[in-house]
Amino acid sequence: MIQQYHGELVDWPHPDITVLDDATRRTFLNRKLAVELYAADIPYGEIQEQTKFSPNEVRRLLRRCVASAGEGCIVGFYALLPSFRIKPYFRTKPIIAKHPLADQRSSGYAGALAQLFEKFPDVKKDLIQKFFLQPDKQKKSKNSRSPQLGPQPYIEIHGEFLSELRTKGVGENEWPFLTEDKGRRSLLRFLHSLKNERSERAVKARMGAEATNNLGHGMGPNALISPLLPFAVVELDYTVIDIPTHVRVIDPNGTGHLIPISRWYLGLLVEVKTSAILGAHISLEVNPSADCALQTMLSSVPVVLDARNSGDVRIEVRSTNMDFVARGPTLICSLIPQLAGQAFSLLRVDNGWCNIANDFVNNVIDVFGCAIEFGPPRAWWGRSLVERIIGVSKERGEHRLKATYASGPDDVRRPPDVEQLGLNDGIDLDFVVDMLNAVVREHNTISTGDRLNGATVINVLQRFVDKHELLWVPQPLPRSINSNDRLLMHRRKVEVRGEWGVHTRRPYINTAYCRYTNPRIASDFSMIGRKVFVYINRLDAREAWASDAETGENLGKLYGEEKWENWRCALRVRELVGAKAKGRPRGRSPDIYARSGKVDYEFVTSENSGENIGKKTALAIAKVARDSFTGSKSASLKPAEEDNHNNNVGSDNDLLPNINPRGIFKLDSGNKK
């Protein structure tokens, strides 16, 4: 009866008998002894003498042990536990309605649902399909008013279940209609059993994308590559800073440029063994780009410290105005000079666009000489350390400010008018940089935790530097790498402009709100229309070089316009200032221009914006927009329903014409018709 494929008895599934009470343990051990004696070819008589079990009972116990448990397994010794089921219960007795006084009760119908599924297997199939149907695969019904935004609720599944049974001829005097809850509890138990049997599929279908992503970790085994010494593995990640701030930039003329920014990003480079923050960079971008990634890497290299006066917006060695930490250096490269520009072996990043860009990958591998590990998409647990440090930094920093988005819309620390509050109060970016400097310094020099057994990051790293018996030697990057500016270059592919003819203009390159040229390009009119690669220093946008995109010829250093040559600023700062200057036409009031933009936006987004507008109407709209800037009172746009409404021509309201719900405008040139 025990076949070879059943394996040895010592390998059979076995329960933990220490949790059993004395009576249950004695019963189990006696049954197990009978099976073991049978497997050892002991005669039935001796087995019965020791265990008091007849030969038929021994064979019955053995059949229970070798019963299939699914997926090629057997039940094993679990089958010897009292009241243990080796197969599910199936009702064979027909369902008969009870006495009228007991009709509304649900007891006495055990196994009724399984019996119903045996009779109508397609009903069971439909239930399983509805339960596991993912929201993105649900089809919108023709009669439904809105698409299904989530998993189908249990109450709807139960209602459709009853409707389907009625169509199949199940009467009101049959189960489940003769019970008080119409079989709702039995159906819920069945659906919950599906959730337990196929948990991963249930999570994907009913718990959302975030819960599905969390299935990727927590399986037990640790990472295959685990750092044993400092600077073996580092992690790079970014977090959005939900603080409405003002970027305050002062140009060489002393003019202050105040640029509002609602959200921006912070990049962090963290060492895994000691959890030290090696680099940090603030990126004033909608989404992190390759520039943000490279400048975060650059912040751990001494070359960044030499350019601290470049006007770049980044975390660097500077004093902080925060009182809850000591003033002084921030990053490891300044706290421990021996670790300035330290090399590392492996860099862990996610699959974001900024990390898979060729500009980032090629430069990091060429300069740092490390391998890059791209984690799976939306798998934060692959870089759990940097994610945890980001969370702590936000709690210690931005979430303590008055104008903060906090952790979400439901956070009690989030004020209702956070955007207006932050911009009105003028939270300056320099203050936020000082705050983040303080948080980074606190993490590297003061904070302790279980990861380092109560020691600080700087003490642990200093111990590795001083004690050679720890088998670690600093390996800084070569000086040739530190002086190499490849990482500082931002590359763009642009077209050479110019003109040959009556209005001759020498060839030049227009990018980053600046015209670049040099004698080589300006003297060769054949360059007009050709593509070139422009390399701009991220920390000092005045420094730029060019090369031919087709031949690879080095076109030499570029020279920018005079208005930019006297201002040493970062490329991103120049783009912010240039975008603000280009956003308002010359000679126009900022208030009037903003009102005009609002008029254009409201007209384009009105309900009738998709209708064909005649040429005369379009010209009239353009004329009104022009006259609103010049102050002319010749025409104004008014809603068709308000012909008889008299407005003061020339007032501020003329610049903002009323818009009716249909978005229809009518030209009014002073003559009422």
Image (cartoon, grey):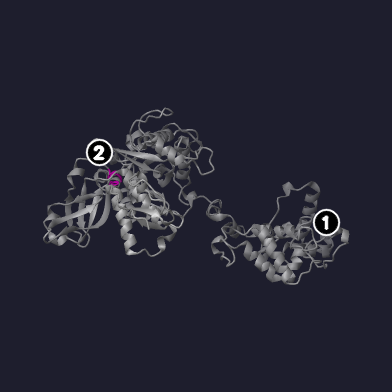
Q: Position of residue 61 (x, y in %)?
A: 78, 62
Left or right? Give the position of 555 relative to 38: left
Name the kind of residue labelled 2 in the image. Answer: Asp
* Residues packed near mark 2 inside 10 Å, few (<14), some (14 to 19) or many (20 plus): some
| Residue 653 image point, x, y percent | 37, 46
Q: Nearer the viewer, mark 2 or mark 1?
A: 2
Position of residue 159 measured from the top left corner of the image (x, y, whole percent): 69, 62
Sequence-first tag of 2 and 1: 1
Residue on which disc 2 sits? 251
Residue in view at x 34 percent, y 47 percent: 649
Quadrant where the N terminus is found in the figure:
bottom right
| Residue 571 belongs to magenta span | yes
Q: Which residue occupies the foreground of this view, 494 or 463?
A: 494
Looking at the image, which residue is at 35% across and 48% down?
654
**Magenta span covers which residues?**
570-578
Q: Secondary structure at mark 2?
A: loop
Residue 95, numbered circle: none
In the rendered image, is residue 212 in sight? no
Horizontal side, residue 496 vs residue 658: left or right: left
Measured in 3D between alpha carbons, the distance from the residue under mark 2 to the one under mark 1, in whole angstroms, is 99 Å
Q: Is residue 536 magenta?
A: no
Q: Helix or strand or loop: what does disc 1 sit on? A: helix
Magenta part mainly helix, strand or loop?
Answer: helix
Q: What kind of residue is marked 1?
A: Gln
Give percent across and percent down for residue 49: 85, 58
Q: Disc 1 marks which residue?
A: 50
Judging depth in this view, the residue of 469 and 215 nearest the camera is 215
Instruction: Tell me if mark 1 has few (under 14), some (14-19) or many (20+) residues whose alpha carbon lies within 10 angstroms of its own.
Output: few
Q: Is residue 414 left or right of residue 73?
A: left
257 or 353, nearer to the observer: 257
Q: Note whether residue 504 is visible.
A: yes
